Amino acid sequence: MTSHTLPGAPFLAYRGPQLFIEDMCLNDLAKAHGTPLFVYSKAAMLHALAAYQRAFVGRDAKVHYAMKANSSLGVLQVFAQAGCGFDIVSEGELERVLAAGGHAADVIFSGVGKTREEMRVALQAGIACFNVESEAELDVLNQVALSLGKVAPVSIRVNPNVDPKTHPYISTGLKGNKFGIAHERTLQAYQHAAQLPGLNVVGIDCHIGSQITTSEPYLDALDKMLDLVEQIEAAGIPIHHLDFGGGLGINYNNDTPPSADTLWAALLARLDARGFGQRRLMIEPGRSLVGNAGVCLSEVQFLKPGEQKNFCIIDAAMNDLPRPAMYEAFHQIVPLVQTDAPAHLYDVVGPVCESGDWIGRDRLLNVQAGETLAVLSAGAYCMSMASNYNTRGRAAEILVDGHQAHVIRQRETVQDQMRGEVLAFHQTRQTSNTDNTKV
């Protein structure tokens, strides 16, 4: 039987005409569990994590999975069991970490808008560190910590004004972005934090964006961050750990990001050259750990020819796969079963009542109604951003481990969606005034 692996997805391959993820036939999974259906490869996640682990051999370093990329409990469990920490941005994400078997002591809390209640919950849980993103947040966190009789471990997120060369919506390290404290104000912010009795300065943080495909922005940000560390420590404030965030891109459409171990070989060489090679390191990868580990399976409902476009209408939509509508993002789309039928050019679209509900434009596909397609690179920022628009239930999720397929999320029903909602007014039975009696 012939076999060939798809680019960027080492555990996704055609065996003969059938597409497999690890040792599971995706067409069989679609028939057994219905569509839309997200399917993830455990081996692919651990393969991606291994590249970071290779890079950090002999270093004092910790990988914290940025769970906003995909916060499904089954996915979190894979990383918890692999020894990862977690990067969170809400109280809800902290609860998910704990439910999946993670530990609060391995959690970093990022985000620009932490509420006082979220701060209280995180402090009581005993998280590792707050990545603070404004001077106002320093003051509020200090107040909350003192009210609980605790001291909050903090690092300050620096905005280094480095262009990550990515989509503007996922760029986070430029002056015009809402994230972090301006490079020019960082020293003053640290001096202020060091004077607050409810805070303990433990580190410094920098995250410049997502889907970064070159090393240069990281190296630029690293140099600016180390310049600041030298200034801060010269002012008498020790920095115990360096947090470099995440953001490494994946291959969606012939993208060529460096591998994690190649990127970190360059960054570690720079750290060594500047005398910081033995400092404790923290990183927060998300997309690069899960993006190419997942696919979304979707059945073709109709083929609709048009004067300007031919449309392939599938049962997955922008509520399942929001990235194309949000970012005009590209996902490869392939059939689950390869045939020799002639291919035609289609826009692949969903059933949601929005012109923005498209999954792929101008795709050459040999497909018929009733067949199933796989949308690739769907492990990150798909299910975690899924919605119930048009009262559509969120898809089921499967985690594949070799020959085993584990259901890690049941398909959402309308009843699931309406749970917690109540009618505002008492309903009375309506009677019809129509008289259907024959005369």
Image: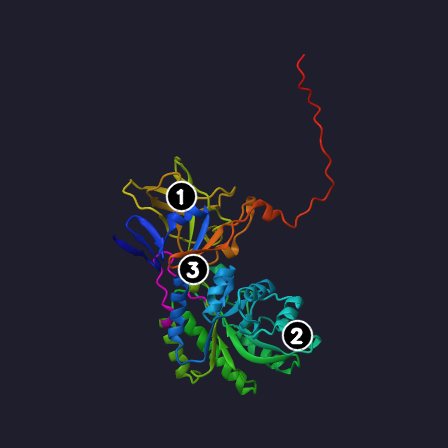
Mark 3, secondary structure of its residue: helix
Badge 1 local density, few (<14 within 10 Å), some, or many (20+)?
some
Mark 1, secondary structure of its residue: strand
Which residue is at 54% across, 76% downward? 184
Mark 3 → mark 2, Cα distance in angstroms: 37 Å
Q: Nearer the viewer, residue 328 or 108?
A: 108
Mark carried by residue 347: 1
The reply to whether callout 1 and callout 2 are in contact (CB within 8 Å) is no
Eyeballing the image, is 426 above or below 100?
Answer: above
Say which amino acid is labelled 1: Asp
Magenta stretch holds residue 260: yes
Residue indicated by mark 3: 291
Residue 417: image location, x then y, percent: 59, 48
Say which amino acid is labelled 3: Gly
Mark carried by residue 22: none
Which residue is at 46% across, 82% downward? 279
* Main SS class of the magenta portion in the image: loop
Say which amino acid is labelled 2: Asp
Residue indicated by mark 2: 139
Residue 98: image location, x then y, percent: 56, 67
Of labels 3 and 1, the one closer to you: 3
Residue 246: image location, x then y, percent: 46, 68
Q: Nearer the viewer, residue 293 or 254?
A: 293
